[in-house]
Amino acid sequence: MKSILITGASSGIGRATAELFLAEGWRVGLLARRTDLLEEVAADRPGAVVLAADVTDPAAVDGAFAEFIAVAGRLDVLFNNAGIFTPPATIDETPLDDWYRSVNVNLNGMFLAARAAFAVMRQQRPQGGRIINNGSIAAHVPRPGSMPYAATKHAITGMTKCLSLDGRPFDIACGQIDIGNARTPLVEDMADKLQAADPAAPPLETMAVEDAAASVLHMANLPLAANVQFMTVMATKMPYIGRG
């Protein structure tokens, strides 16, 4: 049975991805802070392993990976997905706590998970595995007032490139998926707020979160001799290409 560990697995893209991989017969490590939500995902799914941990806590992350390996035997894929948004603001009006929280979760948390996965994949036999980082459309084009989120997501692109280079001697592949406007509770809440702020504005273009999950599955199913280095999957009509 192939194995994947998914961070941020309790909701949104992480949850949809976990549910798809479980349906496809994978052993799935579900990592997030809230045990109750993880147990909802795991219910009646024997391939699920609940791993309650905070991605910003190095000891908790290492412990969760060790717990998963004890059950699964090896780690084939990490979907490095956990992340947060903070309220929109210009840089001078951005609370420092929002900046530090974003860096801690979106960058430090992804670093810690990638670090733990890399160590496992380097040491296991057969050696190797795949790390899939969840970047964002914001890794290329930010929304106004999104400094903490956009800056951390741009940093993930650098992390992806470094992991790709450093992983080559150990058969560790690394790619990045940049997802735009998948229908998650966070995106739906943002769409409602934008509509309330400007009722005359066109509705936010979105796509099914299941299509984002299917894209992760495609990346994960490739042999280690092949890699999707960067993938952009987004709502077709969202204003990303050109000036909108």
Image (cartoon, grey):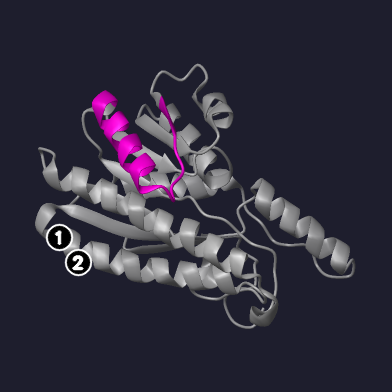
Quadrant where the image shows the N terminus:
top left
| Above-or-below relation of 125 to 129 | above
Within 10 Å of the Cα at label 2, are there few (<14), some (14-19), or many (20+) other Cα atoms? few
Q: Look at the numbered discs 1 and 2 and tell me whether their residues touch, using CB distance below 8 Å.
A: yes
Give residue 108's mark. Answer: none
- On screen, residue 37 above or below 218: above
Residue 148 versus residue 16: which sits nearer the camera? Answer: 148
For numbered disc 1, what is the local secondary structure? helix
Using residue 52 as the reference point, say whether residue 62 is left or right of it.
left
Task: State yes or no: residue 231 in magenta.
Answer: no
Which residue in the structure is indicated by mark 2? Answer: 165
Residue at 53% from the left image edge and 39% from the top image edge = 16
Circle 2 SS class? helix
**Image coordinates for residue 124, horizontal then vertical, percent:** 13, 39
The range drawn in magenta is: 49-71
Q: What number of labels is visible? A: 2
Query: Which label sits on residue 168?
Result: 1
Give the amino acid type for the residue marked by disc 1 in the picture. Arg
Q: CA distance from mark 1 to mark 2?
A: 6 Å
136 displayed left or right of 122:
right
Q: Position of residue 141 (x, y in %)?
A: 55, 76
Residue 130 makes an appearance in the image: no
